Image: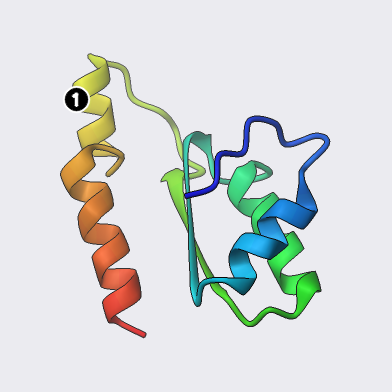
Amino acid sequence: MLHVPTLKPLDTSAVVEFAERSRFVVTVENHSLIGGLGSAVCEAVAESGTGARVRRLGVPDSWGEAGPLDYLRTRLGLDGPSLAQAVAEFIGGH
């Protein structure tokens, strides 16, 4: 696991080093997928030539819902079981 506390400046060397050690990189963020951590990681990995595959998990670009946090996490696939399933399918499908 790699903790990425800031997007700007992005610790590109740490991201690339992580991607070099793994065939798969999964990012998880509790906000929009567009322009967030996943996008920055995709750029860094693509430009590095590591060949690692990246899967972004987060909030899709659509109108949001309101409700309790647990409900929203489940609805968006950001609860523990949903994240585990998404990662297993990503890794198992390749």
Q: Position of residue 24 (x, y in %)?
A: 47, 71
Pointer 1: what residue?
71
Q: Residue drawn at (27%, 27%), measured in percent from left and top?
A: 72
Instruction: State the residue in front, 72 or 46.
Output: 46
Secondary element at image label 1: helix
Q: Residue furthest top?
A: 68
Q: Is residue 64 left or right of residue 13?
A: left
Q: Residue drawn at (19%, 25%), measured in percent from left and top?
A: 71
Which amino acid is tagged 1? Tyr
Above or below for 11 versus 51: above
Q: Position of residue 42 (x, y in %)?
A: 66, 62
- Locate residue 87: give its quadrant: bottom left
Instruction: State the residue in front, 28 or 71.
Output: 28
Q: Residue drawn at (51%, 72%), measured in percent from left and top?
A: 22
Number of other residues with Cα within 10 Å of mark 1, as a class: few under 14, some 14 to 19, many 20 or more: some
Q: Quadrant of the C terminus?
A: bottom left
Q: Position of residue 66 (x, y in %)?
A: 31, 17
Instruction: State the residue in front, 68 or 61.
Output: 68
Q: Position of residue 41 (x, y in %)?
A: 66, 55
